[in-house]
Image: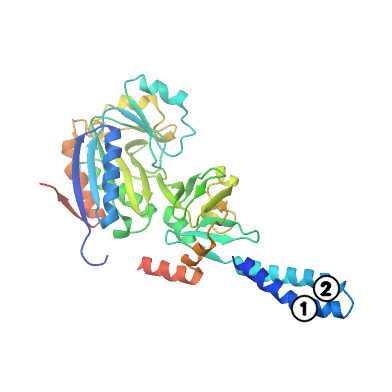
Amino acid sequence: MAAYALLRSMSSSFSSVLPLLSRSGSLSPAPLAVKTLFRRTLASSSRFSAALKFTDKHEWVRVEDDGIGTVGISNFAQEALGDVVYCGLPEVGTQLAQQDEFGALESVKAASELYSPLTGEVVEVNSLLADKPGLVNKSCYKDGWLMKMTIAKPAELDSLMDEAAYERYIRSIED
Amino acid sequence: MQGSRPLVRVVRLGLVSYQEGLRLQQVYVDRHRSGPAHSLLLCEHPPVYTTGIRHQPYPASRLDPLRLLGAEVHRANRGGLITFHGPGQLVCYPVLDLSGFRKSVRWYVAQLEKTVVSACGSLGVTATTSPHTGVWVGDNKICAMGIHCGRYVTSHGLALNCNTDLSWFSHIVPCGIEGKGVTSLSRELRRDVSVHEATPHLLAAFGEHFHCELSEDA
């Protein structure tokens, strides 16, 4: 989504650069310039896409460099649950529509449903959680991630809250 | 708390099969789609063993022998491990939208525990909570709990032993906790305490701990 747009604008600026280089008769610096520009742009795009987006049900999704979305629950959610003792997660290959139930977390004898932030296919599930479900509490944004999925409809990201909006949302709930 | 207290409708189902209980819970869960519709379902079940979302510890080979005892066996989408429901046990399924209370499952379960502790207290039984969810008298569980929460709407709930035949529990490790037993209001008070007697105490305690108004259909 964001990365793709950046690559597209970069390639359009190349078509204006390359004719200049070929006129000077030297082609070899151009590939190097391309590589450097490419890497620099990817680096800035990965900083951009590393931002978390949140649902109103306290799931977050982070778009990785490869366009895959990592999904987890927020700190607010893990505190409201209590100590997680079991993570019921989907099978790899499961197709999910935005807001579909994709699993449940158990804490204090309560099974709380999880809802997909986006439409896509489950490509990986965090296998560490089978033996260490508590990672969801201890490291909800990092080691306690729940699943990874493809992003079939990137526009859905716009319907999610950014960190600042989510913070405001939390405060409004707590009142 | 802001403004007026939430209204919770008490629904007395009587003796219903576990399956019928599940079906009715879903009916009351679905009512929340068109606005607040908090309900408290009360019932008793014929003998049934149920397991929760952690079904790996209970393969068919472990559950089938329980059927031979004359009980049904069901898997449920609630938290908690294996338990037993049967006549003489007050089963209560609060179908609440936590948005009308507090959006925390941890808070909700704690309030349910306090409700049962108060109800036991008003009947003369000193019960406590422990790191294991549920309500205890010493090392014996008097009330089991296991709930489900989806889109803030709760289902499943609690099961308080009034004059339950506790021998049904000897065929399982209740809630997967080794070394602990079960008890009932009747056992603790050494007299018969029926579901009918215990129910008003539970309802009063619920109204108190959830700061809500309970209404009964005519």
- Position of A121 compared to B191: left or right? right
Q: Quadrant of residue A10?
A: bottom right
Query: On the image, numbered disc 1 is attached to which residue?
Result: A17
Q: How far across and down, in percent of the image, does residue B95 sit?
A: 28, 48
Front-most of residues A53 and B178: A53
Q: How far across and down, in percent of the image, does residue A77 sit?
A: 45, 57
Is residue B106 depicted above or below A18 in this figure? above
Q: Which amino acid does label 1 sit on?
A: Val
Say which residue appears at 49% left-offset and 50% top-offset. A96
Say which residue appears at 37% left-offset and 36% top-offset. B139
Which chain's residue wears label 2? A
* Mark carried by residue A30: 2
Q: How far across and down, in percent of the image, does residue B104 sit?
A: 38, 56
Comes first in the chain, label 1 or label 2 = 1
Q: Which amino acid does label 2 sit on?
A: Ala
- Same subunit, tags 1 and 2: yes
Q: In which quarter of the image is residue A173?
A: bottom left
Q: In which quarter of the image is the C terminus of chain A?
A: bottom left
Badge 2: residue crowd in 10 Å (few <14, some 14–19, many ≥20) = some
| Label 1–label 2 contact, CB within 8 A | yes
Tell me the element at label 1.
Answer: helix
Q: Which colour scheme is used?
A: rainbow
How far apart are labels 1 and 2 at the CA level?
9 Å
Is residue B193 depicted above or below B11 in this figure? above
Front-most of residues B212 and A59: A59
Tell me the element at label 2.
Answer: helix
**Residue A125 in view of the camera:** no
